[in-house]
Structure formats: C-alpha cells, structure tokens
C-alpha cells in the first residue's frame, strides 16, 4: 500500500499494532499518506484520550497532521491543568475544613489595647496573605496544621505588625514575628497584650 513509514514503525513496535489497526484500515481505505508514523500514532492516542471516533476519516486522516497533533497536545495540556487546579481546590477545601474543625472554636477571638488589635487567623487564605505580607513561613510551613499552635495577627489600623503563635498546651506566646522574622517596634507591647488576654483563648479551649 506504499505506507513505508507505518511498516517501519510497527516492525519496531509490533506489540502496539492492535491498538491502531482499526485506524490503519481507515488510512489505507482513504489512501492517506503518513510521513511521520510516530506522530500519527501519538495523534491517535490523543484522539483516543478525548473519545473521538477512531474509525472516522475526519479524525484519522487530518489534512495537516502536525497542526492537529499540536492542537490536541495543547487541548490535553489544558485539560490536565484544569484537573490539577480542581485537585488543588479540593485539597485546599479539605485543609480548610480540617483547620475549621481543629481551630474553629477560637474563631472570632479578637482584642485591643486601644492602639494594637490582635485577631485569630480564621482561614487558610488568611494564612497565605499573612505569610506573603510578612515574608515569613507561617503559610508555607503550614502552621495551620499544627495541633498545639493558634496563630493570631497583630495590626495597627489594618497594617500588619507581627504574627503571633500561641502554644495551646502551655497557654503561652511561643513566638511573635514581624516582617522577615524581625521584631517590630511594638514587639513587647504585642506580647504583653496577648498575655493579658490569654484567658479568652483558655475559655474557648475548656468550653
């Protein structure tokens, strides 16, 4: 039939012939010349992935094999990216639910000394924003998954000053970190304020 490239390809890959034979028959019937058998087989694999009719000459015998091959490669890449994004969102939702279940009892806790305000972080997104704004690892190191930690954010007029970690087992300030893990000018005042209001956390812990 003059399909030398196909013959060479399946001589080297005889175990795969059955996967493509129905499409090869369409190729032969339509006298469609294949110059790149490897690319054509990859293209058929892509058609199979998208559940296209492998006995339809419209798909099996494209006018421009390379263009159609590349189009389906891009289509599959976008499909896989969409799946990856869906999986990421599912994982984030699962982590959000885990965090809410573990620390939800503390949500709503907030206090101030008239100048500094301190509030519990109530979502994974708030952890992300806190970590990005403060240039530290409270989000990347997943502090929201630490059983003994309660994380709070200290601010003045909405401007972040420090991120505070409270040990729930000891009811003590474990650490308080400003931008790039440095102390802010309000470091001692923040720790004093959190210690003064530790009973609010203790009440939720024992409720």
Image (cartoon, rainbow, N blue to C red):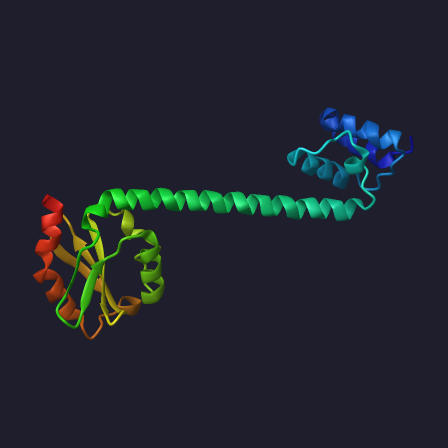
**In which quadrant will I find the C terminus?**
top left
Residue 30: give x, y in percent of width and height: 88, 33
The quarter of the picture where residue 133 lies is bottom left
As displayed, is residue 30 above or below residue 201? above
Residue 201: give x, y in percent of width and height: 13, 52
As displayed, is residue 200 above or below residue 39? below
Of residues 22 and 101, which is closer to you in this image? 101
Q: Is residue 126 left or right of residue 113?
A: right
Residue 19 appears in the picture as rendered: yes
Residue 46: give x, y in percent of width and height: 68, 38
Single out the residue that lies furthest toward the bottom: 185
Residue at the (76%, 31%) spot, across then down = 12
Residue 1: give x, y in percent of width and height: 91, 30
Q: Is residue 47 left or right of residue 127?
A: right
As displayed, is residue 159 above or below residue 66? below
Residue at the (8%, 62%) spot, across then down = 196
The quarter of the picture where residue 118 lies is bottom left
Of residues 201 and 46, which is closer to you in this image? 201
As displayed, is residue 146 above or below residue 50? below
Residue at the (35%, 57%) spot, across then down = 128
């Amino acid at each position: 039939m003059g399909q030398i490239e196909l013959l060479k390809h399946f001589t080297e890959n005889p175990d795969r012939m059955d996967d493509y034979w129905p499409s090869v028959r369409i190729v032969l019937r339509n006298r469609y010349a294949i110059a790149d058998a490897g690319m054509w087989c990859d293209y058929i694999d892509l058609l199979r992935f998208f559940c296209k009719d492998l006995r339809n000459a419209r798909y099996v015998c494209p006018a421009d094999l390379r263009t159609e091959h590349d189009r389906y490669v891009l289509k599959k890449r976008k499909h896989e990216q969409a799946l990856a994004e869906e999986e990421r969102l599912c994982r984030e939702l699962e982590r959000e639910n885990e965090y809410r279940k573990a620390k939800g009892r503390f949500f709503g806790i907030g206090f101030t000394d008239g100048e500094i305000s301190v509030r519990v972080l109530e979502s994974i997104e708030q952890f992300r924003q806190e970590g990005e704004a403060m240039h530290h690892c409270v989000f990347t190191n997943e502090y929201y998954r630490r059983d003994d930690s309660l994380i709070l954010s200290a601010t003045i007029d909405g401007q972040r000053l420090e991120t505070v970690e409270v040990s729930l087992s000891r009811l003590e300030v474990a650490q308080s970190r400003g931008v790039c893990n440095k102390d802010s000018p309000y470091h001692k005042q923040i720790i004093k304020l959190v210690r003064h209001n530790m009973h609010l956390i203790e009440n939720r812990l024992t409720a």
